[in-house]
Image (cartoon, grey):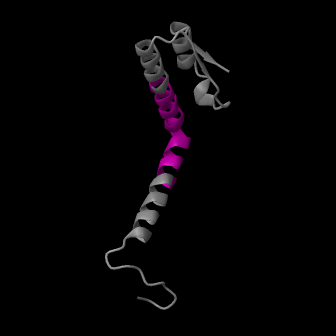
């Protein structure tokens, strides 16, 4: 243990994990900013989520789903608008 460091339990790698996580997030954010991958991923995840909701609603015999979402750009893409037209049981406000 170096001066000024707190003792950590034997085998603890929490500092290493946090450093690796922050580094990964920084690299991912930089790459996403450059090529728009993060936005695309969020759009895909949101469509997948909507698809699961529609499947669940159909299994349960529901006729309409009303969702409250924020104004994130991933919720307003052309693919999402197309998905909503194809699934009129979904209503987003």
Q: Is residue 38 above or below residue 87?
A: below
Residue toward you, 5 or 63: 63
Image spot of residue 42 (x, y percent): 51, 33
Instruction: Please give the name of the residue rendered at 43% of the width and 23% of the height, measured from the top-left corner.
Output: 52
Image spot of residue 82 (x, y percent): 54, 12
Verify whether residue 70 appears in magenta. Answer: no
The residue furthest front is 60
Image spot of residue 16 (x, y percent): 40, 68
Image spot of residue 89 (x, y percent): 55, 10
Verify whether residue 31 appears in magenta. Answer: yes
Where's the C terminus, which quadrant?
A: top right
Q: Is residue 25 above or below residue 91?
A: below
Instruction: Please give the name of the residue rendered at 56% of the width and 8% of the height, measured from the top-left corner.
Output: 88
Instruction: Please give the name of the residue rendered at 49% of the width and 22% of the height, measured from the top-left corner.
Output: 50
Q: Is residue 86 above or below residue 12?
A: above
Q: Main secondary structure of the magenta part?
A: helix
Q: Is residue 13 left or right of residue 36?
A: left
Residue toward you, 75 or 67: 67
Q: Is residue 55 left or right of residue 66?
A: left
Q: Is residue 39 above or below residue 91?
A: below
Residue toward you, 42 or 89: 89
User: On the image, which quarter does residue 58 sit in?
Assistant: top left
User: On the image, which quarter does residue 1 sit in?
Assistant: bottom left
Give the extent of the magenta segment.
26-48
Instruction: Please give the name of the residue rendered at 43% of the width and 19% of the height, measured from the top-left corner.
Output: 56
Q: How many marks?
A: 0
The residue furthest bottom is 3
């Amino acid at each position: 243990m170096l001066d000024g460091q707190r003792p950590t339990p034997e085998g603890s790698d929490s500092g290493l994990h946090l450093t690796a996580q922050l580094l990964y997030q920084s690299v991912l954010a930089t790459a996403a900013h450059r090529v728009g991958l993060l936005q695309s991923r969020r759009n895909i995840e949101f469509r997948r989520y909507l698809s699961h909701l529609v499947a669940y609603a159909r299994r349960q015999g529901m006729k309409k789903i009303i969702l409250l979402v924020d104004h994130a750009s991933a919720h307003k893409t052309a693919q999402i608008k197309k998905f909503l037209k194809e699934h009129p049981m979904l209503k987003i406000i």
